[in-house]
Image: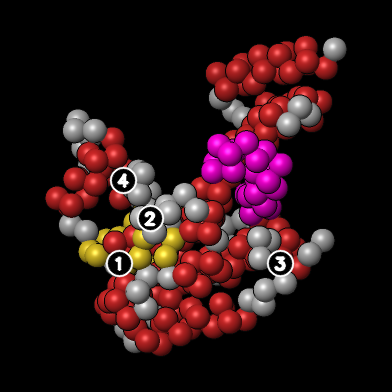
């Protein structure tokens, strides 16, 4: 077991204990950058915090002085979800950029958290300011948030209290990795997607949905016995009757493929 895997598993076993989200994101990114030393990237969090000096300068520093912004031209590039490459390139997905804001802001003593905003990752600084890392740290007021929501979900979509709910750091990391997993699966790179999913289970070992997704990737690879075993574990973990019935039907389908 590598040191990175061991440390990520420690996060998974720690329950609700706080952890350094920036460090965890670097460890996850290191699997696609083997042999690259992480110390320079770790130091970059401190560099950002020192340059900002105070929480109210965080967005201006990351989005202005350091030029961090979203990658519109090659949005689906996997580099945009690897924090090492995001730091190298100064661009990435909203959630990857958001982790930089969270890591740097907390080093300044600020309360910085990700928001469960649908379709577009945002952060909240000191419980008031909502910041869009993808747009260079632009502050988002309700009218702009409403427009962002409607652009993603249609003209009938309206802001709800749930859209402003904080996302736990573990959920932020899962969202980051899920971006990679989904892109790999769309490319039919199922083996690579399965490797990413395995890392996700290290940090969230009790999440039933990950076990189900593992089964589907195993089935896509033709490993129906493994898919059945994963679905049986999923049924034991999942409390919802409907989900268990759906999984049972999949088990029957996959068992038929074993004959």
Earlier in the chain: of badge 2 and badge 1, it is 2
Q: Residue at x 65, y 40 (%)?
A: 189
Q: Dot 1 lies on which element?
A: loop
> Which residue ends up furthest to the left in the rendered image?
143
Report, in whole angstroms, how far the alpha carbon at label 2 lies from the one at label 1.
Answer: 15 Å
Q: Residue at x 56, y 69 (%)?
A: 84
Name the residue tied to disc 3.
34
- Check residue 136 in the rendering and tell me which mark sits there, or answer none: 1
Where is residue 216, by image quadrant? top right
Image quarter in which the C terminus is found: top right
Report, in whole angstroms, how far the alpha carbon at label 2 lies from the one at label 3.
Answer: 26 Å
Say whether marks 3 and 1 touch (CB < 8 Å). Answer: no
Report, in whole angstroms, how far the alpha carbon at label 4 lies from the one at label 2.
Answer: 27 Å
Q: Residue at x 62, y 61 (%)?
A: 28
- Check residue 219 in the rendering and tell me which mark sits there, or answer none: none
**Would residue 211 be seen by someone viewing this image from the given angle?**
no
Instruction: Give the x, y percent position of residue 85.
Output: 53, 67
Say which of marks 4 and 3 sits in front: 3
Say which of marks 1 and 4 sits in front: 1
Q: Is residue 188 magenta?
A: yes
Where is residue 235, by image quadrant? top right
- Extent of the magenta region: 182-208
Name the residue tied to disc 2.
73
Earlier in the chain: of badge 2 and badge 3, it is 3
Q: Is residue 57 magenta?
A: no
């Amino acid at each position: 077991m590598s040191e990175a895997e061991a440390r990520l598993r420690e996060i998974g076993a720690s329950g609700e204990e706080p952890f350094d989200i920036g460090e965890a994101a670097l460890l996850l990114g290191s699997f696609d950058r083997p042999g690259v030393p992480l110390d320079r990237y770790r130091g970059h969090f401190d560099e950002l915090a020192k340059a900002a000096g105070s929480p109210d300068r965080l967005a201006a520093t990351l989005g202005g002085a350091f030029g961090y912004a979203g990658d519109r031209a090659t949005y689906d590039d996997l580099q945009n979800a690897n924090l090492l490459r995001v730091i190298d390139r100064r661009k990435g997905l909203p959630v990857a950029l958001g982790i930089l804001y969270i890591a740097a802001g907390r080093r300044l003593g600020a309360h910085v958290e990700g928001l469960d905003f649908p379709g577009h990752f945002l952060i909240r600084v000191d419980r008031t300011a909502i910041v869009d890392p993808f747009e260079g740290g632009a502050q988002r007021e309700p009218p702009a948030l409403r427009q962002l929501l409607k652009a993603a979900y249609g003209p009938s979509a309206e802001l709800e209290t749930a859209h402003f709910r904080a996302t736990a750091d573990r959920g932020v990391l899962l969202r980051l990795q899920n971006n990679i997993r989904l892109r790999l699966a769309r490319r039919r790179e199922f083996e690579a997607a399965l490797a990413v999913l395995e890392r996700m289970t290290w940090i969230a070992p009790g999440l039933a949905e990950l076990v189900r997704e593992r089964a589907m990737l195993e089935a896509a690879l033709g490993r129906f016995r493994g898919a059945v075993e994963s679905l049986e574990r999923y049924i034991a973990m999942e409390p919802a009757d409907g989900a268990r019935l759906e999984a049972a039907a999949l088990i029957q389908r996959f068992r038929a493929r074993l004959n």
